[in-house]
Image: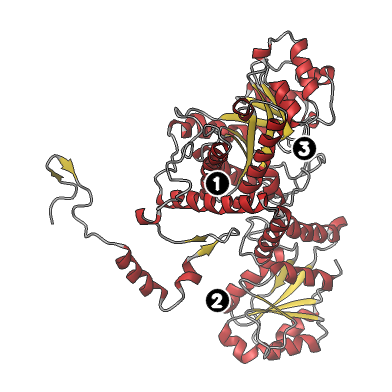
């Protein structure tokens, strides 16, 4: 073998010493590893949009969509020169004026302001006192305070060209044409928001979020056209808001596809393909109240994906946002997450860092094609709400079976975690957090164990030595903990009678038999019978369902964990 990395003709070839391998060679090795198992079932994942994700992608997979070619305008970003994204932080009066100033002085580029009602220049002036005029104030989607904001700018003596911010009017709102007309005198003001993130909060898939935002964008264009506004100028007054989730590749591809789709829409309207102004917000649906510290990881991944996907502005939710009013630590970590990725990791210094990845390019094509077809269906009269409801139902089933695990909630729950309490704050309208069903069980169990009484418990009837039952007893312990139930168990019982006697000394009406398949053949049925004879009203078995054992239910990988825990709660009187 020649020296690795030897230069040939002045060019170093790192691959010269390795045999070339193609998909056929790779498939041969995969088939050996699968040992007869189904390739599609083991290695292919189907998204909620029906897109099949393969385990391997090559250049041959990126054929592109003929109607929206791979190098369609703005796929790689809305700004040809790249540059840093805007760090935007949400703020409401409940968070306090001091925290608003801390955000501004702590590196935030813009504020998204959440205020109730129309407000007044005086009210906004008090809230924004000390905030430099150079910091854009973006009213939250659906806001009615645009006139109060303009009044404040005028009161501060700013020239129209110095106004910086946004009105937050929804793109499909009847007021949108008036807001756009008003904003045309203010070059630095965005008038409207096409709020795709709202659909994601309700349970929409990526393609549904894209199609819905396109529909809002088209409604915006129609309203502006009917009002006699110049569409090229009106388009520049629209911002699109998308959710960034923990699936980083889907987030990157979604943002890339969104720009391609909007360029196609504007082109179809007879305009020059327009850049899409994008604001990515970390998805509210992924946030948890239990073990909220994990939210820091979720939002970091989402922020990274949004930046790599080319978002123009990003808002990261504090780790405790799902609990209530965020505290100073949560707000500081949220903005510092962005600053670290931007100022220390320098993500913005590479234009379209995900571009060229065969997988990301293929997924961008797939999402764009799927979303475009759905958008056409919506234009023909299809109901998006029905499709979102179906997607939400499918995702909820995956959460219930833990096919879609939630760390710290449905998987790896910590029963003794300290309670994180915050002043209450209303959740965004329509938000359906994925963790809510499991968190409701935890809340009920905690309430039953309050006041110094014992936390609800289930008895583990472990058969055989630890090495024999530990896999299933550990599995059952973690599953029960997801419902706030503590598992109590001994080191293992030699006979069914010993297990029944030990259960009788416990205070729980629920028992879970745990052991190996081999020992089940010998003792499972007898142990279940002995427990029932001793008075146990609800006997579960950790393992696949088998009528021979006579158990009342079964706990196994892929089971409906939520339904199983709800049944245990019912037996415990919770």
Report if the CB atoms under discs 1 and 2 are less than 8 Å apart.
no
Mark 1 or mark 2, which is nearer to you? 1
Marks 1 and 3 sit apart, C-alpha to C-alpha, by: 30 Å
> For residue 283, what is the image quadrant?
top right
Front position among marks 3 and 2: 3
Q: Position of residue 298 (x, y in %)?
A: 60, 47
Residue pointed to by mark 1: 254
Q: Which mark is residue 467?
A: 2
Which numbered circle lies on residue 325? Answer: 3
* Residue under the point 72% across and 69% down: 487
Q: Nearer the viewer, residue 173 or 517?
A: 173
Which of the labelled discs sits on residue 142, or is there none? none
Task: Compute the Cα span from label 1 to label 2.
Answer: 47 Å
Judge from the rendering whether residue 66 lies leftward or rightward of residue 149; answer left or right.
left
Q: Position of residue 30 (x, y in %)?
A: 37, 69
**Percent position (x, y) of residue 550?**
72, 88
Q: Secondary structure at mark 3?
A: loop
Q: Quadrant of residue 561?
A: bottom right
Q: Which of the two discs, 1 and 3, labels the residue nearer the N terminus?
A: 1
Question: Residue, x 64% and y 57% (percent of image)?
Answer: 406
Q: Could you tell whether 561 is left or right of 122 in the image?
A: left
Question: Is label 1 in a helix, a strand or a loop?
Answer: helix
């Amino acid at each position: 073998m020649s020296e690795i990395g030897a230069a040939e003709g002045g060019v170093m070839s790192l691959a010269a010493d390795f045999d070339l391998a193609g998909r056929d060679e790779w498939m041969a090795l995969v088939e050996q590893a699968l040992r007869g198992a189904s390739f599609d079932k083991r290695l292919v994942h189907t998204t909620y949009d029906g897109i099949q994700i393969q385990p391997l992608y090559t250049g041959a997979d990126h054929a592109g969509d003929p109607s929206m070619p791979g190098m369609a305008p703005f796929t790689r970003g809305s700004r040809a020169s790249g540059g840093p994204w805007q760090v935007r932080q949400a703020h409401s009066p409940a968070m306090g004026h001091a925290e608003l100033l801390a955000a501004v002085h702590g590196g935030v580029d813009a504020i998204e302001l959440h205020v109730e009602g129309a407000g007044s220049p005086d009210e906004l002036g008090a809230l924004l006192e000390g905030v430099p005029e150079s910091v854009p104030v973006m009213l939250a989607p659906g806001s009615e305070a645009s006139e109060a904001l303009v009044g404040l700018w005028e009161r501060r003596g700013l020239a129209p060209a110095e106004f910086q911010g946004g009105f937050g009017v929804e793109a499909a709102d009847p007021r949108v044409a008036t807001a756009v007309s008003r904003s045309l005198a203010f070059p630095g003001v965005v008038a409207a928001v096409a709020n795709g993130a709202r659909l994601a909060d309700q349970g929409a898939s990526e393609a549904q979020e894209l199609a819905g935002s396109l529909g809002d964008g088209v409604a915006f264009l129609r309203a502006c056209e009917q009002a006699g506004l110049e569409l090229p100028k009106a388009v520049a007054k629209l911002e699109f808001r998308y959710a960034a989730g923990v699936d980083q590749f889907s987030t990157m591809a979604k943002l890339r596809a969104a720009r391609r789709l909007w360029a196609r829409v504007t082109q179809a309207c007879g305009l020059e393909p327009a850049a899409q102004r994008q604001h990515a917000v970390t998805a509210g649906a992924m946030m948890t109240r239990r073990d909220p510290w994990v939210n820091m990881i979720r939002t970091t991944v989402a922020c990274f994906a949004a930046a790599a996907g080319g978002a123009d502005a990003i808002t990261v939710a504090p780790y405790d946002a799902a609990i209530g009013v965020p505290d100073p630590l949560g707000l500081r970590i949220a903005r510092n997450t962005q600053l670290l990725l931007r100022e220390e990791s320098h993500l913005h210094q590479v234009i379209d860092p995900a571009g060229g990845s065969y997988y990301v390019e293929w997924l961008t094509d797939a999402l764009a094609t799927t979303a475009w077809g759905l958008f056409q269906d919506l234009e023909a009269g299809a109901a998006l709400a029905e499709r979102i409801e179906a997607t939400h139902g499918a995702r909820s089933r995956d959460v219930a079976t833990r096919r879609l695990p939630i760390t710290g909630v449905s998987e790896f729950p910590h029963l003794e975690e300290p309670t994180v309490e915050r002043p209450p704050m209303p959740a965004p309208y329509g938000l359906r957090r994925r963790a809510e069903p499991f968190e409701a069980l935890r809340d009920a169990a905690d309430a039953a164990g309050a006041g110094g009484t014992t936390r609800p418990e289930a008895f583990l009837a472990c058969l055989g030595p630890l090495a024999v039952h530990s896999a299933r007893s550990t599995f059952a312990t973690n599953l029960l903990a997801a419902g706030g139930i503590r598992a109590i168990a001994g080191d293992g019982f030699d006979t069914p009678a010993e297990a029944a006697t030990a259960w009788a000394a416990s205070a729980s009406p629920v028992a879970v038999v745990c052991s190996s398949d081999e020992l089940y053949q010998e003792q499972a049925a007898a142990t279940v019978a002995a427990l029932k004879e001793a008075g146990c009203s609800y006997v579960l078995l950790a393992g696949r369902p088998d009528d021979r054992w006579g158990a009342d239910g079964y706990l196994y990988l892929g089971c409906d964990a939520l339904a199983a825990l709800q049944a245990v709660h019912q037996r415990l009187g919770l």
